[in-house]
Amino acid sequence: MANHRQAIKRNKQRIQRQAHHRHYRTTMRTHVKRLRAAIEGADQDAAKSALVAAVPVIDRCAQKGVIPHRRASRLVSRLTLAVQRLPQA
């Protein structure tokens, strides 16, 4: 347990930051999960709309430091490629 005032403060800040990041991370994962479900269902219209919704959320998470920029870029790239590979309706 923290014994100094500064250590107590840093622990409180860590807990607040974890909660803040958890919100963004779960929101991002939900969007990605919806997109992957649309891709598996081979529904191109739903996949494209889910991609349009998911990309800004992923970018926002990277911008806020929830995930690394390269991971966000890689995720967007792979999801976009998966949507493009769907058969035309």
Image (cartoon, helix red, strand yellow):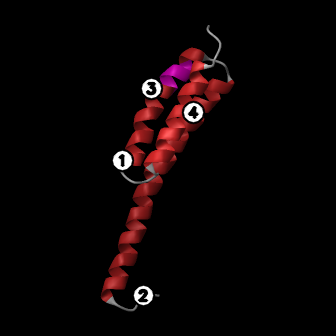
* Mark 2: amino acid: Ala
Figure quadrant of residue 30: top right
Whichever of callouts 3 and 1 sits on the residue coming sooner in the sequence is 3
Specify few, some or many for label 1: CA neighbours under 10 Å numbering under 14, 14-19, or 20 or more.
few
Q: Which mark is residue 78?
A: 4
Above or below — where is 47 with respect to 73?
A: above
Mark 1 or 2: in front is: 1
Which of these two is toward me, 33 or 55?
55
**In whole angstroms, how far apart are the C-alphas of marks 1 and 2?**
31 Å
**In whole angstroms, how far apart are the C-alphas of marks 2 and 3?**
45 Å
* Mark 4: amino acid: Arg
* Mark 1: amino acid: Gln
Mark 4 or 2: in front is: 4
Name the quadrant of the C terminus.
top right
**In whole angstroms, how far apart are the C-alphas of marks 3 and 1?**
17 Å
Whichever of callouts 4 and 2 sits on the residue coming sooner in the sequence is 2
Q: Which mark is residue 63?
A: 1
Q: Residue at x 33, y 79 (%)?
A: 9
Q: Secondary structure at mark 1?
A: helix
Whichever of callouts 4 and 3 sits on the residue coming sooner in the sequence is 3
Q: Position of residue 22 (x, y in %)?
A: 47, 55
**In whole angstroms, how far apart are the C-alphas of marks 4 and 2?**
43 Å
Query: Label 2 near label 1: C-beta < 8 Å?
Result: no
Q: Residue at x 39, y 63 (%)?
A: 17
Q: Report the magenta residues as a range.
A: 46-50
Judging by the rendered image, the residue that carries numbered circle 2 is 2
Judging by the rendered image, the residue that carries numbered circle 3 is 52
Q: Residue at x 68, y 22 (%)?
A: 41
Mark 4 or 3: in front is: 4
